[in-house]
Amino acid sequence: MDMSNYLRSLYCFQKKSTSGIATLKPDMDLIHERLKVAQEHAKRK
Protein backbone atom coordinates (compact mmCIF):
# COMPACT_ATOMS: atom_id res chain seq x y z
CA MET A 1 0.00 0.00 0.00
CA ASP A 2 1.28 3.43 -0.92
CA MET A 3 1.23 5.63 2.15
CA SER A 4 3.53 8.28 0.70
CA ASN A 5 0.92 11.00 1.28
CA TYR A 6 0.80 10.28 5.00
CA LEU A 7 3.03 11.25 7.85
CA ARG A 8 2.48 9.14 10.91
CA SER A 9 4.34 8.65 14.13
CA LEU A 10 3.70 5.02 15.00
CA TYR A 11 5.88 4.86 18.05
CA CYS A 12 8.43 7.02 19.86
CA PHE A 13 10.84 5.82 22.47
CA GLN A 14 14.18 6.68 23.95
CA LYS A 15 16.74 3.98 23.40
CA LYS A 16 18.44 3.35 26.70
CA SER A 17 20.68 0.43 25.83
CA THR A 18 24.33 1.24 25.48
CA SER A 19 25.14 -2.18 24.07
CA GLY A 20 23.74 -3.42 20.80
CA ILE A 21 21.60 -1.62 18.28
CA ALA A 22 18.64 -3.99 18.05
CA THR A 23 15.21 -2.69 19.03
CA LEU A 24 13.50 -4.87 21.61
CA LYS A 25 10.87 -7.33 20.37
CA PRO A 26 8.00 -5.82 22.44
CA ASP A 27 8.75 -2.42 20.87
CA MET A 28 8.88 -3.92 17.35
CA ASP A 29 5.62 -5.82 17.94
CA LEU A 30 3.89 -2.60 18.97
CA ILE A 31 5.26 -0.74 15.95
CA HIS A 32 4.07 -3.48 13.58
CA GLU A 33 0.61 -3.54 15.16
CA ARG A 34 0.27 0.24 14.87
CA LEU A 35 1.45 0.11 11.26
CA LYS A 36 -1.23 -2.47 10.46
CA VAL A 37 -3.89 -0.26 12.04
CA ALA A 38 -2.61 2.77 10.12
CA GLN A 39 -2.72 0.84 6.84
CA GLU A 40 -6.27 -0.33 7.51
CA HIS A 41 -7.27 3.24 8.33
CA ALA A 42 -5.70 4.48 5.08
CA LYS A 43 -7.64 1.89 3.06
CA ARG A 44 -10.96 3.22 4.41
CA LYS A 45 -10.24 6.79 3.30
Image (cartoon, rainbow, N blue to C red):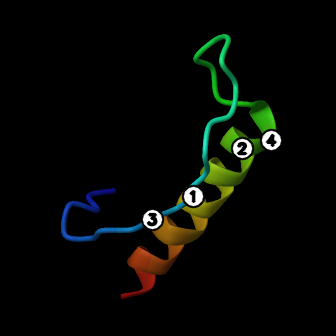
Which amino acid type corresponds to the residue marked 2 in the rendered image? Asp
Q: Secondary structure at mark 3?
A: loop
Tag 2 near tag 3, CB within 8 Å: no
Residue under pointer 2: 27
Which amino acid type corresponds to the residue marked 3 in the rendered image? Ser
34 relative to 42 in the view: left or right: right
Q: Quadrant of the N terminus?
A: bottom left
Q: Position of residue 29 (x, y in %)?
A: 73, 44
CA separation in Å, label 3 and label 1: 6 Å
Question: Counting residues from the N terminus, which is met first, the one under dot 2 or under dot 1?
Answer: 1
CA separation in Å, label 2 and label 4: 4 Å
Which amino acid type corresponds to the residue marked 4 in the rendered image? Pro
**Residue at image coords 67%, 11%:** 19
Tag 2 near tag 1, CB within 8 Å: yes
Residue under pointer 4: 26
Q: Position of residue 36 (x, y in %)?
A: 58, 60
39 relative to 15 in the view: left or right: left
Residue under pointer 1: 11
Tag 3 near tag 1, CB within 8 Å: yes
Q: Secondary structure at mark 2?
A: helix
Question: Counting residues from the N terminus, which is met first, the one under dot 1 or under dot 4?
Answer: 1
Residue under pointer 3: 9
The local crowd at label 2, few if under 14, some if 14 to 19, many if 20 or more residues have their Cα within 10 Å, is few
User: Is 3 in front, or is 43?
Assistant: 3
Q: Secondary structure at mark 1?
A: loop
Q: Quadrant of the C terminus?
A: bottom left
